[in-house]
Amino acid sequence: MRYIEYFLFQGIVLVMLAPLVNGIIGKIKAFSQKRQGPPFLQLYYDLHKLFKKQIVVSDVSTWIFKVTPMIVFTTALCAGMIVPVVTSFIPENFPGDIIFTIYLLALGRFFMMAGALDTGSTFGGMGSSREALISSLAEPSLLISVITVALISGTTSVSGMMLKMQTENTPLLQPVYVMLFLAILLVILMDTSRIPVDDPSTHLELTMVHEAMILEYSGRNLALMELGAAIKQLLLITLVVNLFLPNQLFIGTTGVALVVISLVMYIIKVIFVAVIIGLIEVSSVKFRFFSVPNIAALSLILSFLGFMQYFILGR
Amino acid sequence: MGLILWAAPLSAILIMFLTKTTKAHHIISVLVSVIEVAVTWVLTYQVMVEGQIAYGFVGKLFYLDAFSIILLNLVVIVGMLAAIYNIGYLNHEKKNGEIDLKRIRLFYMLLYGFIFTMVFALTVNNMGLMWIAVEAITLASTFLVGFHNDKKAIEAAWKYVIICSVGIAIAMLGIVFLHISSLGINEGAGILDWTTLYDNADKLNGPVLRFAFIFILIGFGTKAGLAPMHTWLPDAHSQAPSSVSAMLSGVLLNTSLYPIIRTVSIVNKNMESSVFTGRLLIGIGLISLATAAIFIITQKDYKRLLAYSSIEHIGIITIAMGVFTPAAVFAGLFHMINHSFTKSMLFLTSGNILQKYGTREIGRVQSLIKVLPFSGTVFLIGLFAIGGTPPFSIFASEFSILISIFDNNNFILGVTIIGLLTLVFVGIVSTLFRMFYYNNREENVTSGETNKYGVAVIVIMLVIISITGLYMPEGIFNLMVDAQNVITGGI
Amino acid sequence: MILVQRIIQISLILYVFSLFFPIFMMKNQKTANVGSNMLTAAAGLLGTAGSLLYLFYYDAKLTIINVPSSWSFIVINSEFDRLSAFFVLILSIVAFATAIYSIGYIGEYYGNRDTVLLNCLMSTFILSLFLVFTASNAIWFFIAWEAMSVISYFIVVFESENEENQKAGKLYIIMTLVGTAFLIINFMLMISYTGSFSMDMSSSSIPSGIKNLMFVFFLIGFGTKAGVVPLHIWLPQAHPAAPSNGSAFMSGVMIKTAVYGMIRFVLMYLGVEHTWWGITVMTVGMITVFVGISYAFVEKNIKKLLAYSSIENIGIIFIALGITFIGETKGDPTICALGLMAVLVHSFNHSLFKSGLFLGAGSIQYATHTKNMEELGGLAKKMPVSSVLFLGAALSISAVVPFNGFIGEWIAYQALIRNIVIGDINVDLVTMLSIAVLAFAGALALATFVKAYGISFLGLPRTEHSEYAKEVPKTMNAGIGLLVGLCLVFGILPMTLIRIADKIVEGIVGQTLIGGMSGKFFIATYPVRMGASSISPLTGVLILAVIGLIAVVVLKLAGGKTVERKYETWGCGYQSMNSRMQYTSGGYSKTLSIIFRFLFRPTRKLKQNGLYKYHPEEMEYVITTEPVFEKYLYEPLSRLTRGLSKVVKLKIQSGSIHAYLIYIFLTVLILMLYNRLA
Amino acid sequence: MEKYLDILSILILVSSFALMANKRIKSYINTFRIQAVLISIAAGIMGAQSYAIEKRLDIIIVCVLIVILKVYYIPKMLHKTYADIEYKVGKDFFFNIPVLIFACFALVVFSYYCISDIQGIDKGQLNIQIVNSVSVVMIGILFMISRKKAIGMIVGFLVIENGLFVTTLFATQGMPFIVDMGIFIDMITGIMIMGIMVFRINDKFDSIDINDMKSLKG
C-alpha cells in the first residue's frame, strides 16, 4: 500500500510541477528583457490544447514514431519515481538506483532519437545526430558527479544518497560539492536543451537540437514529448536540489503536515534552481555547435576536480 | 639383404637402359622402389631386434644402426612415393610434348642413380666412402636439376654443381683433419669408420677434431642448405622437376645432415660437452632460420618459397642438434622425419600446380582449390602443417624442440626461434595464400586434377603427417629413442 | 555426473556428425545444409542442458575427452569445471540460435557457393571453440586455439573473390599468429619452470620477474584475439568479412576465448601478483572502450560498426577484469568477486546480443545484398519482423533498462565504485577515469545503435537495394528471436543469470555474492542488490507498464477521440521530401569525427562542376576518415619489414655465383678464426 | 727425403700463386698441368718410400692415375672444350692480379695463423706442409671466385681438389686406398659433368661468362 501511495505522490508532484519550471524560466527571461512574457502556466495551457488537437503522422514513419511519445513520457515518469521528491514514505529496500535512473532515461532517449530518424526528415536526423553528440559528452560528467556522491554515501541508491547528504552540514560550503553542483548544473543545461547549448524557443536549423527531433510530432504526441522533457528536466533539478540543498525535514518526517512543509521547501528550492538556469539563459548566448564540447569539457573537469578534491587531495 | 638395397637401383638403371617403352620404365621404377622399401623394412626389423647390423664384402663396409635406418627409411619411402607420383607427372609432360621417351629414360636412370648414391651414403660405415657418396649425389642430381634444359634450369644446375662441389671439397678437408686426429689410434681396418671413431672418441686429438668439425660443418652444411651456404638451394629446388625437388628437399638435406650429426656426437664425446658444437650449430641454425624468414616474406615464386622453408627447417634441426640434450636430439630427429614428409608432399603438390598453371609465380595462380580440388586442399593444409599448426607432426616436433630448449634454460634462444618461426609463417601466409583466392582474373585453366597418381600420393602423405602429429607407432617410437641414444651416446 | 558427461559427449558427437553430414550429402546442398544445422542445433541444445545441469548440480571436474597420445607433452584431455561450463553454455546457446538461423541464411548461397564447406567450417569452428573452453592443459588449449584461429580464418575468407576479404583474412591470420607466438612463449616458460603444461599445477615455482613477463605476454597474446587497442585492427576487417553466421560466432564467442584465457591463465594459474597488472588491464580496457565506440559511431558499414562495438564491449570486460585483478592483489574477495561477476555477466550478455546483431546484419545483407548503411533505409516496412528483432538487440547493447546489457554495466559500475574505496591513488584515478569512459561509451553506444537501426531500418529507402528488400525466411528470424528473447529475459530477471555466474565466481574467488545480491522487494527474487544499492528491472518494467496504462486510459478519457491523419513529412520548404534529403550515416556521425579529429583525421573534399563557381551543375562531396592505427602504426611496420626483405633478398641472393662462393669462403675463414680465438 | 717433400709442398703452393697470376684461360690450364706434375712427383716420392718400407703399392697407383688424369687427360679435355667453344681470347678475372696475389699471400698467412697453434699438428714439417696445402685449397676457392668464365671455375675446383689431395698425402700418406679411388672416380665424373654443363651453358647463353647468369634471384 505504501508503495502505491508513494508512487501516486511522486507521479502527481512530477506531472503537476514539471511544466511550471519552464514557466518560471520563461518568466525570468521575459522579466530580464522587460517584457511581460507568457504566464507561468503557459505550458499547461499548451499541453491542454495539444491533447485535443488532431495528430498528423508522416506517411514515411513506422510504429516507432507512434510509440515514441509514450515511451519518452513513461520512462521519464518512471525514472522520476526513483528520485524521491519529498517523502517520508520512502519504502524500505526500494531499488531506486541512480544508474538505473540514468539508463532508464536512456531508453527514452533511444526512442526519441530513433523516432526522429523515422520520418526521414532532414531535421529529425540533424537533431538526432546532435543529441547523440551532446548526450555522450554530457554523460561522463553526470556519472562522475553522481558516483562521487555515491562513493561518499556508500550507495548508488538515490534515496540512500539523499539521506546521506541530509546529514552533511550545508554541502555547498564544501569545495567538493560546489564542483559537483556546478558540473551537474552544466549537465542540466546540456540535457534539457537550454541556452547556451540549444535554444528551445527558436526553430532555426542552425540552433535546433531537441526541437528538431520533435519537429514532426503533433497533437497528443507532441504534448507527451513536451511533458516527458519537462519531467526529465524537473527530475534532474530534483537531483541537484535534494543532493546539494538538502532539507532537514526531507526524511524522517511523518504526518501530512510535515510532508507538506517539506514539499513547500522543495518547491522553493526548485524555483531557486530554475531561476539560476533562467539567469544563465539570459546572460549567455547560444554557442556554436562545435563549442558544445567546451562546455562538456568544463563540466567534466569540474566533476573530476570534485572527485579529486574529496578522494585524492582530501586524504 | 643389405646388398640388395643398392643393387636394386643399380640394376634398375641397367634395365631402364635396355627397355624401350615408357610403360615399362614406370613399372620398373615402381617395382624397384617397392623392393627398396621392403628390403629396408626387413633391415629395420633387424635393427630393431639387434640394435645395429654390419655387413659388406670387405670387412664390415656397411653399417646400419637406428639413426641411419631411420634416414634410410625416409629415402626409400619418399623415393617410392615419388616414383608413383612420377608416373602421372611424366605422362603429363609427355602428353604435352615437353619430353620424349629418351628423356624419360634418362630421367629415371639419373633418379635411380640419385637414390643409389643416397642409399649408399647412409649405409656405408667409412667416412671417406660416405664423402664419395655425398659427392656422387651431387653429380647424379645435377642433370636432374637441369632436366628441363632451359636457361634457368641450366643456370640452377651449374650453381648447384659448383657450389655443392666446393662445399663437399671443404668437407673433405674436414675429413682429412678427422683422419689426422685419429692417427695412431685406429690403424688398419677400421680407419675412418664411424664406429671406430665413435668408440675411440675420447682418444682422438681434440683440437684437430674441432678444426675438422668446422670444415665438416661448412662442407656438408653447404649440401644441407644451411645459411649462408644455402644459396644453391632455392635455385635448384625451384628449377628441378617437382618429384626431384621433393627428393632434394625431403631426403637429400637429411642425408647431408647425417655426417654432420655423426661428427657432432664424436666431437661431443671427445670434449665431454656440447658447448663448442652447440655454439656453431645454433649460430648457423639461427642464421638459416633468419635468412629463410626474411626471404619468405616477399617471395613471389612458390617453389622458391618452399625451398626457403626447407632452409628454415634444416636450421631448426641444426639448432636441436646443437642443444644436444636427449630430448632435443630426439625432437630434432623427429623433425627430420616430419619435415621430410611434409616438404616432399608440398613439393609434389606444387608439381601438380605447376603442371596445371604452367607458372611458378604466386600472383598468377588463383582459385587453387576450385581448379585442383585435391591438390589445392592438400597444399593449403600442408602450408599450415609446415608452419607448425597443430595437430600436424611438424607442430609436435617443433614444440618438442622448443620445450627442450626452454628446459635447457635457453630462454633467449627459444624466444628468438619462436619469433622467427612466426615471421616465417607470416611470410607464408602473406604470400602463398593468394593462390587460393579467386582474384577476378580470367581463367585460362580448366579445373580437374591431371595427375591421379600424384593425388593419391600426396593424400597418403597428408594422412601420415596428420596422424604422426599425435600418434607414433610404438616400434618407430622406440627406434627413434634408440637413434637418439646412438647420437647422444646414452645407455 | 555420468549423465552430464554423457549429455556433453553426445552433444560433441552431434557436432562431429554435423561436420560430416554435409560431406556425405555433398550432392544435395539443401539437405546437407538443413541436416547439418539441425544437428548443430540439437548439439547446442544438449550442450546448454548439459552445462546448466553441471553448473547447478556438480562441482568436481568432469572429464569429457581423454585420449592418449604418443608424445608425452601432448595431453589430449578436455575437462569441465565451472568456468568451462559457463563458457560452454554461452557457446551452446549461440550455437543453437545460429544453427537455426543458418538454415535459412545459407540458403542464399545455394548453387553459387560451396555451402557444404561453410557447413563443415561452422561445425568445426564450434567444436574448436568447445575444445578451447574445456582444455585442461596448456598444450591442448593451444592446439584448440590454433584450430580455432585457422578455421575462423577460413570463414573470414569464405567469400574470397572480394579483395577486401582477402586483405582482412591476411591481416587476421597474421595478427593471430603474432599473438599466438606470445602465448607459445608463455607456455614454454610454464613448462620450463613447473615441468608441466597442466593448468592445475601451482605456479609458485615461477619467479616473480618471469611472472610479470608472462602476464604481459598473456595480455598481448589474448589481447590480440580479444581485439584490445592497439591490437584490434584485424577485428573490424575480419568480422565483417565473414558470412554473418560466422561473424556471430567470432564476435559473440570467439573473442570471449581471450577473456576465458585471461581468467584461466592469469587469474587462476599465475595468480595476480602486483596491482599494476590490474591497472594495466583497466587502462587497456579503457582505451579500448573509447577507441572502439568512437570508431563504431562513425562507421558506415553495418557489420564493421558491430565489430567496433565488439571492441568496445571487450574493453568493458577488460575494465571489469582489471578490477578483478586489483581485488585479488588487494586481498579483497568482494571486489574480486564483483569484478569477475561483471566480466562473466557482460561476456554472457554480449554474446547474446552481439550474435543477435550480427545475425540481424546478416538478414539485412540477405535481403539487400549490401552492408553499406548509406544504401539502406526504410527496411522497417519491408522486413517488419527483422526490424523488431534488430531493434531489440540494439536496445540490449545500448544497455538501456529493461534489457540485459544494462545488468552487466550496472555490476561493472558497482565493482568500480567499490574499487575506489580502497584508497590507492593510482587505482582510484584509473577507476574514476574508467567510470567516465564507461559513461561516455554508454551514451555513444546508444547513439551508435540509434544510428545503426535508424539509418538502415527507418526513413525512406536510399537505394534500390533496400527498395526491393523482402522479409527473410522464418528460420532466420527464429534464430535471432531466440537470442533477443533471452536478452529481454535476462534483462528483466537478472538474478537467473547472476545465480549461474555466482557459481563460477565462488569456484574461483571462493566468495559467493548471491546472499548479498538478491534483494527483497515486492517481486521478491529478482531485484539485484549490492550493498545498499539495488535495482529491480522487473519493477521498473511493471511501473513503466502501469504508467503507460494509466496514461493511455487518462488520455482516452480526457482527450476523447483524437483523429489521426497521414501526411507526408515536412519537406523543409521544398516541394516534397525525397530519400536524398535524409540524414546519411556519414552525416549523422560527422560532428563526432570533427570533434575527435585526432582519432579520425577526417578530410573533406568538395568537387564542383559547372561554368560558374556559384552555380555548380554538379556537386560531389566526399568525407573520408583515416584509419589512424593502420596508417601510423601498422603500415610503417609492414613497409619496413617488406622493404627490408626486398632489399636483403636481392642483395644476398643476387644471382651471382661468385657472391655465393664468397659467402662460403668467408664462413670458412670466420669459423677458422673463431676456432683460433676461442 | 722429407726435405724434397717440403720443397715440393712449397712449389705446389707457388704454382697456385702462378695460376692465380695467369690472365688467360689457356695459360692457366697449362699452369694447372705444371701443378699436377709437381703433385705427381710428390706422390711418386711418397709411393716409392711407402713401397720401400711397407711394400704398399697404393700410393704408386694413385701417382700413376694422377699422371694419366691430371697431367694428361683433364688439361687436354679443357683445352679441347675451350677450342670447341671458340671463345675469343680475353681477360678472365674480376680483380687486379696484384690484388689477387696479395690476397693469396694473406690467405697463406691466415692459414698459418689459424692452423699453427692447433695441438697435434703444430710442430715440425707436418705443420708447414699442412699450412701450405690448406692454403692451396683456399687459393683454389679464391681462384673460383675471381674468374668469370666457366672453365676458370672448373680449374679452380681442380686446384681445390689438388690441395685436398696434397693435404691427405702429406698429413696421412693418403686416405685408405678405396677412398682414394672413389675420390678419383668422383673427380673425373665431376669434371666430365661440368664439361658437359659448359657446353650447355655455351649453347643457351652464347657465352661461358658465368657472370651473365643472374636470372635466378631473390
Image (cartoon, coloured by chain):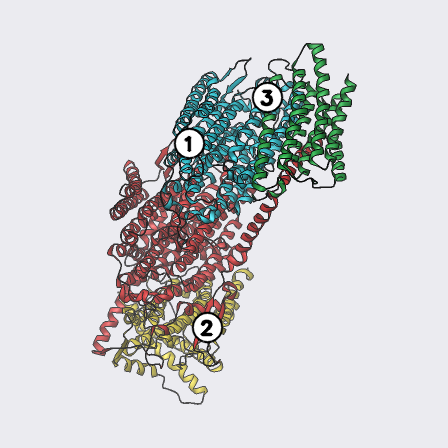
Chain colours: A yellow, B cyan, C red, D green
Give how far apart the Cα atoms at labels 2 and 3 are.
100 Å
Q: Mark 3 belongs to which amino acid?
A: Gly
Question: Badge 1 is on which residue?
Answer: B468
Residue C223: x and y, percent? Answer: 47, 50
| Position of A270 relative to C429 (above/below) | below
Q: Quadrant of the N terminus of chain B?
A: top left
Question: Badge 2 is on which residue?
Answer: A185
Disc 2 and disc 3 in contact, CB within 8 angstroms = no
Give how far apart the Cα atoms at labels 2 and 1 are.
71 Å
Q: Residues within 10 Å of mark 3 (few under 14, many from 20)?
A: some
Question: Badge 3 is on which residue?
Answer: D182
Give how far apart the Cα atoms at labels 3 and 1 are.
39 Å
Comparing marks 3 and 1, which lies closer to the viewer? 3
In the rendered structure, the answer to whether residue A301 lies left or right of residue B382 reads: right
Residue D86: x and y, percent? Answer: 64, 38
Disc 2 and disc 1 in contact, CB within 8 angstroms = no
Residue C304: x and y, percent? Answer: 41, 59
The residue closer to the viewer here, C331 or C238, is C238
Residue A224: x and y, percent? Answer: 30, 75
| Position of B377 relative to B473 (above/below) | below
Q: Mark 1 belongs to which amino acid?
A: Thr
Q: Mark 2 belongs to which amino acid?
A: Leu
Locate residue C468: give its quadrant.
bottom left
In the rendered structure, the answer to whether residue A24 lies left or right of residue D30 reads: left
Discs 2 and 3 share one subunit: no
